[in-house]
Amino acid sequence: MIKFKHLLYTVAVGTLLYACGTDSNPRIENFDHEAQAIKDQDSIVKFLKTHYYKDAVDSIKPLIDGETALMDDVRLKSRVVNEYDIDYTYYYFVKEEGVSEKGYPTVVDSVLTTYRLSSLDASDKLTKVQDLNTPTWFNASQIAVRGWLHAFTHFKGGELKKEDDGSPYNGPITYNGTGKGFFLLPSGLSYRNSGNLPNKTLLYFVSLHDIVENTDHDQDGVPSIFEDVDEDGKPWNDDTDKNNVPNYLDIDDDGDGVLTKDEDKNGDGDPRNDFNDPNKPNVPDYLNRDIRVKY
């Protein structure tokens, strides 16, 4: 379990968070995800052409004369990612990048954030789903919404508020300079055809407060982002020992009976730089079943 500095940021038991996994609605078998992707993209483009971002109220409004459609707003960016063997386009809008020296989170770093969530039920209709106003930690390994993992990489967190003399702030934990903006995710990068919001395009307005830099979910000494063996940017599809547990959640990545954290011959706390098999000089011990020595 990841240990966080600020345990005051919690969620009341029973609160449903719209990013984590849920199976309240069963998945439809033989669903045409490619057709749904085309439908979603068409609705999203129509929405972006007929709406604009109103800075003063941090909100999206129907387009009026004198305003710039989101599709033509230079702050709106898009990115194509391949998930479930389908190319999806998501859109993101960075209003304030964030000031944290930790930099941008990776797709598997845990984040502390607030959000306002709506669903796009048609090209011209947004329906409010939830406002999460309390900064809350999200463990990337428990996130069902793949687009969430990708989209947060475009924002930085803020910095803890301090007193004028630089000492810790004598008050509630507060972050200044948080990363702010929104991202629009097609259903294929959201809950797909299951969960509480099946086949829904989701719009998240977010404020990123903090991240756990180089999160190590399984505490094996290898930051989760570096357990992306095939280097495709998606650590969740790397499973060296084929035990249906991705490396970034597997405490024994090669399944040789020796924990990854113990395959650290040089004792520097990083198993990635230990190579002790002359027959496989480029394979670190923790990914090499032929090396079964606990150091």
Image: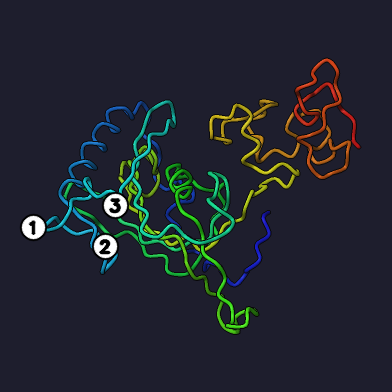
Task: Kindly identify the residue that appears in the image at 46 percent across and 53 percent down.
Answer: 155
For disc 2, the neighbor class at 10 Å (few under 14, some 14 to 19, many from 20) is few
Please tell me which of labels 1 and 3 falls first in the chain. Answer: 1
Residue 160, horizontal then vertical, whole percent: 57, 71
Asked if disc 2 and disc 3 are in contact, CB closer than 8 Å, the reply is no
Residue 280, horizontal then vertical, whole percent: 79, 18
What amino acid does circle 1 point to?
Answer: Asp
Please tell me which of labels 2 and 3 falls first in the chain. Answer: 2
Residue 228, horizontal then vertical, whole percent: 61, 33
Quarter of the figure with the C terminus:
top right
Q: In this view, does 66 lie above or below 152?
A: below
Q: In this view, does 126 lie above or below 39?
A: below
| Residue with the mark numbered 1 | 65
For disc 3, the neighbor class at 10 Å (few under 14, some 14 to 19, many from 20) is many
**Figure quadrant of residue 226:** top right
Along the line of sight, which residue is nearer the eye, 236 or 191? 236
What separation in Å lies between label 1 and label 3 (alpha carbons)? 25 Å
Rendering colour mode:
rainbow
**Figure quadrant of residue 220:** top right
- For residue 59, the mark is 2
Which residue lies most toward the front here? Answer: 165
Q: In this view, does 42 lie above or below 72?
A: above
Asked if disc 2 and disc 1 are in contact, CB closer than 8 Å, the reply is no
Along the line of sight, which residue is nearer the eye, 186 or 229? 229
Residue 279, horizontal then vertical, whole percent: 83, 15
Camera-near label (1 vs 3) is 1
Camera-near label (2 vs 1) is 1
| Residue with the mark numbered 3 | 119
What amino acid does circle 2 point to?
Answer: Ser
